[in-house]
RNA sequence: GCCCCCAUGGUCUAGUGGCUUAGGACGUCGGCCUUUCACGCCGAAGAUCGCGGGUUCGAACCCCGCUGGGGGUACCA
């Protein structure tokens, strides 16, 4: 079994593309042990750029989707494409034609709206493939079953431009043939291209691969997923603080079921369970809420050392270990970390509303907490907690009335890691300093 | 217009003729926990399985029609 992922470098790798890549990769890692070929479809000089190629490879690497062969650049195979083109011209399977949209429209006006265009061979012009005079071109899709298109309704497809350069549907078929691809797993938007490609294989007298068309991914509005729907590309997901393993797991589930009552799977488990036959036929909507939940679960499963490494890489800030330890239960993504615990390193922020409510209105609360803490003979989690708990009980106040002023003094806001833990991590000197500053501010 | 594909709670899915008074997950709502926010735990609401016909003793599962949605329709990929 040989599979391939063949993105065109006309933009960043989108989630739909990532899932197509993933499913091919699962086939390679799973029991079938397929060989995974990566090919870059760069035959459109207008839209293909080197930067996009790099971005795609980068996204694939980040996700951990390694390939066995390639990347093969389609533009490097022009000699072979020309050879195959000449072969079809010589065998009469293809012909030159200068017919354009006007001629095709005129043809349909004469022969009926559903009649496929048939041109007359000319001395020059673009090259069209002659659609055989047979009832239909059919194939057995691995996820959808039999798909059949009447030949009479298919236009003779243009396979090479007037300047001789080949077009997508021709190049794909030739490249898949040369790479001996046995299974083409790609998006549903290629279903209507498949008969054309099948015809190329047929004209070349070559065996046809098996096809599997994946359902498309839609945005919340039910339309094809696009940049307008938020985090649509792999890069954006990475920047939003998602873990690659969570993205892999979530994306795999978007379009296939792997078990009746389980959803969390490692890449290896996904590969072991994946079957093309169990891929869903209907489009799925990308739901970031669920990804977030998955990400939180993966994140909490990480060791503190590993989580710290990733957060340091993500934020670019060193020595995060103490803060990570007291924040890890509270964050869902890597990006959640800094807004929650960054104050430990950046100093207290200032949220006027929080300050007014918890400190300015009644500075005495904070002052007495500050005095209690200042008297501590030893500064550690146990002593801090004991002292503050006693203060709460002794003052008859609600816990929040004692803790919130401290929290606001230390962080600037009402949300932070546990207050005892935060005091402990900050240390006596820094903690008292921040409380003093808040007290000064309150006048 | 023409060709093709699809249709289970808000979302992702399980289900392939009786085990289904349709299972799980996310989300939502309520409660517990509690120093904030989260996490965790407990519980609940939410699906006439798009609609209409068949086939069958019996259909979410099979057949037909319809409706709705999507994709393609380039000398793009």
Image: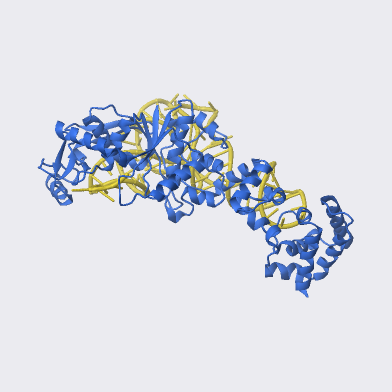
Chain colours: A blue, B yellow
Residue A191 image point, x, y percent:
32, 39
- Residue A270 left/right relative to A279: right
Quadrant in the picture for residue B50: top left
- Position of A375 with respect to A297 (left or right) is right
In the rendered structure, the answer to whether residue A83 lies left or right of residue A268 reads left
Residue B17 x/y as whole percent: 45, 26
Residue A112: x and y in percent read: 15, 45
Foreground of the two, A53 or A215: A53
Q: Is residue A68 above or below residue A340?
A: above
**Residue A255 visible, this angle:** yes
Q: Nearer the viewer, residue A258 or A268?
A: A268
Left or right, A23 with respect to A436, comes to left
Which residue is farthest bottom?
Answer: A443
Q: Is residue A333 at all visible to an observer of this figure?
A: no
Question: Percent x, y for residue A306?
Answer: 64, 42
Question: Which residue occupies 72% across, 54% down?
Answer: A417
| Front-lying residue, A379 or A30 | A379
Q: State which quadrant residue A165 falls in.
A: top left
Q: Residue at x 83, y 64 (%)?
A: A370
């Amino acid at each position: 079994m040989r599979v391939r992922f063949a993105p065109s470098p006309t933009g960043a790798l989108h989630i739909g593309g990532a899932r197509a890549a993933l499913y091919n990769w699962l086939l390679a890692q799973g029991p079938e042990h397929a060989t995974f070929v990566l090919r870059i479809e760069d035959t459109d000089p207008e839209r293909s750029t080197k930067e996009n190629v790099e971005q795609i490879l980068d996204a694939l690497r980040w996700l951990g989707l390694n390939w066995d062969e390639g990347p093969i650049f389609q533009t490097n195979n022009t000699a072979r494409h020309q050879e195959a083109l000449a072969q079809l011209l010589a065998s009469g399977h293809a012909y030159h034609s200068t017919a354009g949209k006007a001629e095709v429209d005129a043809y349909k006006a004469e022969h009926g709206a559903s009649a496929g265009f048939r041109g007359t061979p000319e001395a020059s012009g673009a090259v069209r493939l002659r659609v055989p005079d047979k009832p239909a071109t059919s194939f057995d899709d691995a996820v959808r079953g039999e798909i059949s298109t009447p030949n009479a309704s298919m236009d003779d497809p243009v396979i090479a431009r007037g300047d001789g350069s080949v077009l997508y549907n021709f190049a794909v078929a030739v490249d898949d043939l040369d790479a001996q691809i046995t299974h083409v797993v790609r998006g549903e938007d290629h279903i209507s291209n498949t008969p054309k490609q099948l015809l190329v294989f047929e004209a070349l007298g070559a065996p046809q691969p098996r096809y599997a068309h994946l359902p498309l991914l839609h945005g919340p509005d039910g339309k094809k997923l696009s940049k307008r729907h938020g985090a649509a590309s792999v890069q954006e997901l990475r920047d939003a603080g998602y873990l690659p393993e969570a993205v892999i797991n979530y994306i795999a589930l978007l379009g296939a079921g792997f078990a009746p009552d389980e959803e969390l799977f490692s890449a290896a488990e996904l590969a072991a369970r994946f079957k093309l036959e169990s891929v869903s036929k209907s489009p799925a909507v990308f739901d970031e809420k669920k990804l977030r939940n998955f990400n939180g679960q993966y994140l909490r499963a990480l060791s503190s050392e590993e989580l710290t490494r990733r957060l340091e890489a993500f934020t670019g800030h060193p020595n995060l270990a103490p803060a990570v330890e007291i924040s890890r239960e509270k964050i869902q993504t890597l990006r959640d970390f800094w807004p929650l615990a960054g104050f430990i390193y950046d100093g207290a922020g200032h949220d006027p509303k929080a300050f007014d409510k918890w400190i300015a209105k009644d500075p005495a609360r904070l002052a007495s907490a500050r005095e209690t803490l200042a008297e501590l003979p030893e500064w550690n989690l146990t002593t801090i907690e004991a002292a503050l708990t006693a203060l709460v009980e002794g003052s008859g106040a609600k816990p929040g009335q004692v803790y919130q002023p401290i929290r606001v003094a230390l962080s600037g806001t009402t949300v932070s890691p546990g207050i005892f833990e935060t005091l402990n991590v900050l240390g006596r000197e820094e903690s008292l300093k921040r409380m003093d500053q808040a007290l000064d501010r309150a006048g």
